[in-house]
Amino acid sequence: MNIHEYQAKAILRNFGIPVPEGHVVYNGNAARDWARRLGDGPWAVKAQIHAGGRGKGGGVKIAKTADEVKKFAREMFGMTLVTHQTGPEGKVVKRVLIEKACNIADEFYISLLVDRTTDKVTFMASAEGGMDIEEVAAKTPEKLFFEAVDPTLGMTAFQARKIAFKLGFAMPQVKQAVPLFMNLYKAFVEADCSMLEINPLVLTKEGELLCLDAKLNFDENALFRHVRIRDLRDYDEEDAMEIEASQYDLSYIALDGNIGCLVNGAGLAMATMDIIKHTGGEPANFLDVGGGATIERVTEAFKIILSDKKVEGILVNIFGGIMKCDVIATGVIEAAKQVGVKVPLVVRLEGTNVALGKKMLAESGLNIVSADGMADAAEKIVKAVKAAKG
Amino acid sequence: MSILIDKNTKVITQGITGATGLFHAQGARDYGTLMVGGVTPGKGGTSIDGFPIFDTVEEAVKVTGASASVIYVPPIGAADAILEAVDAGIELVICITEGVPVLDMVKVREYMKGTKSRLVGPNCPGVITPGQCKIGIMPGYIHKPGPVGVVSRSGTLTYEAVWQLTTRDIGQTTCVGIGGDPVNGTDFVDCLKMFEADPETKAVIMIGEIGGDAEEQAAKFARDHMTKPVAAFIAGATAPAGKRMGHAGAIISGGKGDAASKKAFLRECGISVADSPADMAVALLKIWQP
């Protein structure tokens, strides 16, 4: 789960990590008033959307007067910001962060994430601040420094010092960096982050270290123990259908194709998308109904797929493990009755109670094409969709 | 022979009084697995459907002599259940639970260092040695004893591969679902090592996913240390970059871990890679005949 920059900074502030003074606003007048309250300018006016690269799209501006803060903020509200992370449709700005600007002497990059090779939280740093870190990793990997953190010890002072010296800090900055880095690790662990990124960490002309931007990602599997973080979720930033799906514990991601997929298991769901493409079709979505799916969840899965107007055919691919084929069959029949399936529907069932599931589908009176195996299923749905198009 | 489990493996179920735990304990027993009991704190001394229940894993091990444990405990307590099993000296801990927080698993991995326990999972279907022992949620009837080892990050996609083998009358030594989470117990290399050492296993199918570099590590191992043929499939060729496809592990980030580069690398290492998930058995039969 993602949160906004201003929310991330509030969390970091609670861990004693230096971030600029600022406040989130929802209209131009509040922007001006808060600028005045924060003290003398200049101020940074920053559009709050869940995506990086905002500066290039006009989502970050420096204002010299409080009236200019108001002007910039007003321009941002309601604008659709398109960056390399938003997709071509962009995101509408509804919140703006007003901050005291600072005098930047140097910029650095810091992030923490779980490294699946070492199975440890890894601290990553680079003196190439403000840059796209993927680019640094690809072109100049020697400029990236790593410290794997022992989960029983936590981030140690010597590890923080090692990073600070590698970044070229002078002693006064090393002294600031050690608690800052250790607190970043603490924040990462205590909030169950999956990623924490400070880009850039700046050194001001006054010699202070400051987290100028902050991005926090949370492990969704751990949100059950972080009620206050869960409440920060901004549904405006997420795909409406993906939210709808998550309410029924369905894992759904919309894609650009026209063949809807309803599959059990993430791996099989990806493989089903792959085989549709391999057979000459285009998948419309990823949808994993999970293992313990109830009739209600399967029904909702069907509704969600059918609510995508691009969908011109549906492939159901179920290999029963935990999930019984007759449960799937009941869900398919219920949903087809409730929603009314007007597009070709191919169902491939295999596993526990397969004979019963197939029998129920055949006797349902619905127009369902049964398939044997994945290849057969993919060929049948691709063919049916092409035939329906004429 | 087989790897990890056989007809003599005694198994306890942690979380046996939950609906899922009981359902699959019964299923495993019906398959012929030595399901010797279960653990649910507070219900020790009672029994459920003939399974004796214990308060702690330590006690269950002492009484039943179990060497394996399967965990159906909800995510909030799953990591603790693994730790308890390791502490009790269980040799093989299989965690089926989906949705365990990643940082819990980071701690578990650290705690397990230097112990004699092996963890499979979490977020996995389990392990089966066809005809002998089934620990987990896979449908038993799709399997058949034979010479192919199967290892996979995905649950249902494993069934797909197994089914492709069984319908061609090719059986399996052992099938291991290692799970789709970014931090887990047993990886591909561990399984390939065991399959290479197992005299009954003649060939291996490996099913990977986008994200991370576990498949690449496995391919290097196969190239440098294996005499047995390996076929593979990588799911997620159509997945858009940066999107999480159900498994937390399946994220392509920064151009690394995508299906095309994984497939190319596997082929370089001499692995027969299926482009279509319908051709996993076919890919194996291209380089090996039973």
Image (spheres, helix red, strand yellow):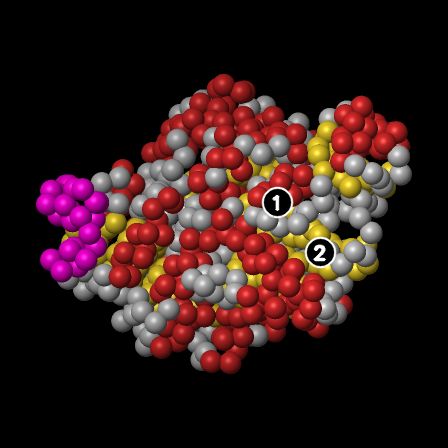
- Mark yes or no: residue A350 visible: no
From the viewer's perspective, is residue A47 above or below residue B221?
above
Residue marked by disc 2: A209
The quarter of the picture where the N terminus of chain B appears is: bottom left
Q: Indicate yes or no whether the magenta region holds residue B62.
A: yes
Question: Which element type, helix, strand or loop, lies under badge 1?
Answer: helix
Residue stretch rendered in magenta on the structure: B38-63
Mark before the other along the chain sequence, 2 or 1? 1
Residue A317, given in percent of the width and then of the height, sits at 48, 41
Say what amino acid the circle numbered 1 marks.
Arg
Residue A1, given in percent of the width and then of the height, sits at 57, 41
Label 1 environment density (alpha carbons within 10 Å; few <14, some 14–19, many ≥20):
some
Q: CA distance from mark 2 to mark 1?
A: 14 Å
From the viewer's perspective, is residue B54 above or below residue B129?
above
Residue marked by disc 1: A13
Determine the chain carrying the residue at label 1.
A
Q: Residue at x 40, y 74 (%)?
A: B193
Say what amino acid the circle numbered 2 marks.
Leu
Determine the chain carrying the residue at label 2.
A
Residue B41, given in percent of the width and then of the height, sits at 21, 45
Q: Nearer the viewer, residue A139 or B265?
A: A139
Q: Residue at x 27, y 58 (%)?
A: B85
- Location of residue B112 by image quarter: bottom left
